């Protein structure tokens, strides 16, 4: 089963690019972030025509997450537990039947947190604490679990073209990185790092200053696997081709293959 995560940076703007990639890459499950689409305006028909079932958590103009699956979607969870006042569409979770077992998948759009020293950074760290609590609960189910998405965290200096340039950014703060490690240390596996040791592979290149053309990116989109999913891991890689398309997202997909 091929599972991918893709921050599309507006479905309205990137729908044709997304459809082209889905046809070429043929992922079985796709976690989307930054759809910037309400549930009502989500282009259901276009994606259902490609054979996908949909679970959607939308929001106008900002945020928005979704799960696309060629298999049925069950037990859909809308929103990250822990704060009933948080109305940002940043988390959706579903269970997918997989042979004689199940795969649980979450699509995550973690807060950016900039600028540091403001309520936005506090919100990011609090959100990460809630994500940790949810991950800890899900791990007790002992299921194959993939927590997929745009974490807005650069894990190490190997995951950024110029660590010094990002020292003041919320994505590379010691607090952000420490909380990311706390989540992984629950017993999760970074699928990409389980398959690749080489530094400087990226999932995001800013539109400004020709970052894509210069190869100056960061790795902030991650697939975190439970032990049951990690045992099934066959391959994981970053598909850079969509970033080179006309009018691309500033992110590109990351995918993993799990054997069921």
Image: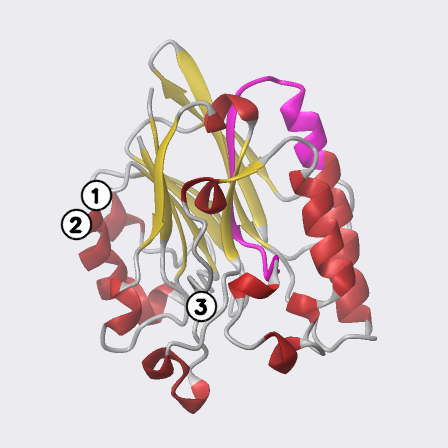
Q: Is residue 8 above or below residue 234?
A: below
Q: Secondary structure at mark 1?
A: loop
Farthest bottom residue in view: 209
- How packed is label 3: few (under 14 Cα within 10 Å), some, or many (20 or more)? many
Query: In the picture provided, is 116 more to the left or to the right than 99?
Result: right
Q: Tell us which disc is closer to us: 3 or 1.
A: 3
| Residue 16 in sight | yes
In magenta stretch: residue 136:
yes
Please indicate whether residue 6 sits to the left or right of residue 58 in the image.
left
- x, y percent for residue 73: 41, 29
Q: Residues within 10 Å of mark 1 (few under 14, many from 20)?
A: some
Task: Name the residue that disc number 2 marks.
Answer: 23
Residue at 47% x, 60% y: name it: 199
Query: How is the protein colored in the picture?
Result: secondary structure
Residue in the picture at 41% in, 66% down:
251
Which one is earlier in the sequence, the residue at label 3 or at label 1?
Answer: 1
Please, what secondary structure does the residue beneath circle 3 have?
loop
Tell me which residue sits at (65%, 40%) in the image. Answer: 184
Span highlighted in magenta in the image: 134-155
Please tell me which residue lies in front, 55 or 19: 19
Query: What residue is disc 1 on?
Result: 26
Outermost residue, front side: 198
Residues at discs 2 and 1 in contact (Cβ within 8 Å) = yes
Residue 115: x, y in percent?
73, 78
Q: What label does residue 204 carry, if any?
A: 3
Q: Earlier in the sequence, mark 3 or mark 2?
A: 2
Q: CA distance from mark 3 to mark 2?
A: 22 Å
Q: Residues within 10 Å of mark 2 (few under 14, many from 20)?
A: few
């Amino acid at each position: 089963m091929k599972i991918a995560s893709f921050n599309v940076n507006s479905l309205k703007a990137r729908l044709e690019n997304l459809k082209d990639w889905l046809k070429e890459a043929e992922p079985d499950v796709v976690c989307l972030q930054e759809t910037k689409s309400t549930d009502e305006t989500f282009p259901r028909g276009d994606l259902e025509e490609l054979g996908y079932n949909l679970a959607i958590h939308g929001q106008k103009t900002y945020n928005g997450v979704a799960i696309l699956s060629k298999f049925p979607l069950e037990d859909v969870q809308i929103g990250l537990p822990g704060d009933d006042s948080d109305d940002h569409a940043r988390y959706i979770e579903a269970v997918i039947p997989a042979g004689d077992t199940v795969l649980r998948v979450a699509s995550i759009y973690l807060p950016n947190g900039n600028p540091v020293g403001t309520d936005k950074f506090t919100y990011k760290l609090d959100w990460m604490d809630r994500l940790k609590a949810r991950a800890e609960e899900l791990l007790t189910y002992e299921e194959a679990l993939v927590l997929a998405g745009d974490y807005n965290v650069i894990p190490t200096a190997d995951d950024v073209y110029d660590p010094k340039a990002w020292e003041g950014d919320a994505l590379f703060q010691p607090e952000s990185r420490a909380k990311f490690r706390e989540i992984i240390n629950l017993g999760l596996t970074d699928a990409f790092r389980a398959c690749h040791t080489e530094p400087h592979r990226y999932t995001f290149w800013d539109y400004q200053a020709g970052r894509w053309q210069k190869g100056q990116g960061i790795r902030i989109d991650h697939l975190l696997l439970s032990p049951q999913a990690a045992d099934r891991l066959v391959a994981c890689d970053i598909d850079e081709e969509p970033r080179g398309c006309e009018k691309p997202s500033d992110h590109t997909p990351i995918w993993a293959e799990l054997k069921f």
